Image (spheres, grey):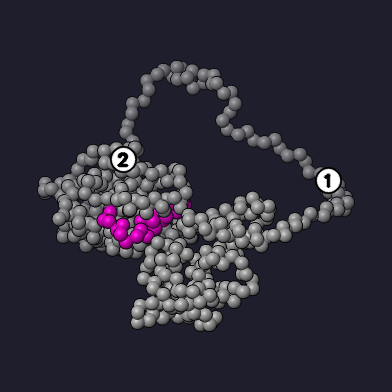
Amino acid sequence: MTFQVDMGLTDGGRAAAIDLEELLATRLLVQGNSGSGKSHLLRRLLEGSARHVQQVVIDPEGDFVTLSGPYGHVAIEAVDYSVGEIERFAGRCREHRSSVVLSLEGLEIEGQMRCAAAFLHGLFEAPREHWYPALVVVDEAQLFAPSGAAEVSEDVRRASLSAMANLMSRGRKRGLAGIIATQRLAKLSKNVAAEASNFLMGRTFLDIDMARAADLLGMERRQAETIRDLQRGTFLGLGPAIARRPVTIRIGDVETAARSSSPKLVPLPDAPAEDMRELLLAEVDDPQPSFVMAPPPPPPPPPARAVLEELAQYEPAEEAQEEAPENLDAILADVLRAIAEDAESASRPTAVLYQDFQVRCRMAGVRRPPLEPSAFARRLAAARAGIVEGIDDEWAEAIAVGAALPDEMLGPFLLIARAAREGAACPDDETVAQIYGTSSLGRARRMLAYMERSDLIVTRVDLSGRRSITIPKLGWTTAAAEVG
């Protein structure tokens, strides 16, 4: 069963529609300068398909929260939540098939990129049983998938770009159909834009954007000038869900409106100048100026001779050395164990967990944290594997073998090492995934395959399907066990 979303009329007066089933399989890219009608187009598409498919909107300006009234979308103001909570919201959204508008209004650009990356990651990592079809609309996509360096930290840029690339390239198998809109094709990552098979190109004026739009529409370069002449709300459409040849579409009306709108001319007040002067200069309730007064100039510096005499007489006081508690190792083990056993710790960034670690240490009477951030990450990985004591002696060799692994892989490696050293059953994929911090069994298996390619482990599956794992450098082997 298919469904046609009415988008308006073609230049020939015929109805223009988008095939919803085809759109779910082939994705859509919308481009146009500010004021060309991109948001109006997206709203028309969302309203027309709202009762037929789940919708997820990542909204940088908060314009689409008005869909929550007549169409029942759940509006989430990202500024009120942490990154970990946003990622969990995404998982629940897929589980309950609820349509959601994630408003990023009020966040700086780096916060918007971090939040969008976490939300898309939560959608992408949902369990297979929750892979229902959904439209994922990302407005102003050039912010989240920039073609070049952005004015944000490199880690945030890579996380956001990776999440957008996953949505457009691998999302289809998980039921996620990416719909991205951008003002500038030249500012949008080519790897992200290239994954779309349907295009709606609106008015644009820069030569580089017109040339890219013409290439995507299969038009000759000399025909690209027609894109500059498009009227507001008119788009050139092409793709398996729209038309096999470029077609001009005039987008129809919508039922809801954005919270913001295009500026309109409003008549100026006709009050006489004297009356206006009295209004502006009338006495106010707060006589203090709203701006900050400049501080008074600093006093003149003392003579150089006085400074030298003072330095010659200075005797540094002996700093009191803080004595570490006698039971520091026990306190450290208890704190790490408590963090590792927290059900929500697996989804929280290491930097946030390190702050939690510092607070817990102070509450236990240790003023200065006994571990640096990098050492904390390794010790936490060991704690998640059930190793909180004997790090520097009985487990030192195993930790040295796994030293080349990324921090997030050390926990699963030590989990296997612990089972192998004790001759216990081989951990199953679900347990390995939990220690790895994911709900995806596929990611856990790929991580084990990476360890095996790195010659850290050797996996053996017997004829009955039971798996055992050997760590050659340690000579330890787990007992065989069912792991599927």
Which residue is rendered at x = 57% and y = 23% of the image? 286
Q: Circle 1 is placed at which residue position?
A: 303
Write down the region rendered in magenta: 110-134
Quarter the C terminus occupies: bottom left
Q: Position of residue 351 (x, y in %)?
A: 54, 57
Give the residue type that dot 1 points to: Pro
Asked if residue 173 lies left or right of residue 109, the reply is left
- Badge 2 density bin: few <14, some 14–19, many ≥20, Cα 10 Å: some
Q: Is residue 130 magenta?
A: yes
Q: Position of residue 477 (x, y in %)?
A: 49, 79
Q: Nearer the viewer, mark 1 or mark 2?
A: 2
Relative vertical location of residue 248 with respect to residue 329 in this rendering, above or below:
above
Q: Is residue 321 left or right of residue 475?
A: right
- Residue 122 shown in magenta: yes
How many numbered discs sit on the rendered protein? 2
Quick one: 195 or 444, which is closer to the camera?
444
Location of the N terminus (image quadrant): bottom left
Residue at 86% across, 53% down: 315
Does 415 sit above or below residue 108?
Answer: below
Q: Is 390 positioned to the left or the right of 435 in the image?
A: right
Mark pair 1, 2: CA separation: 69 Å
Which is the main secondary structure of the residues drawn in magenta? helix
Badge 2 amino acid: Ser
Pointer 1 and pointer 2: residues touching (CB < 8 Å)? no
Residue 433 or residue 482, whichever sits in front: 482
Q: In terms of secondary structure, where does tag 2 sit?
A: helix
The numbered dot on residue 68 is 2
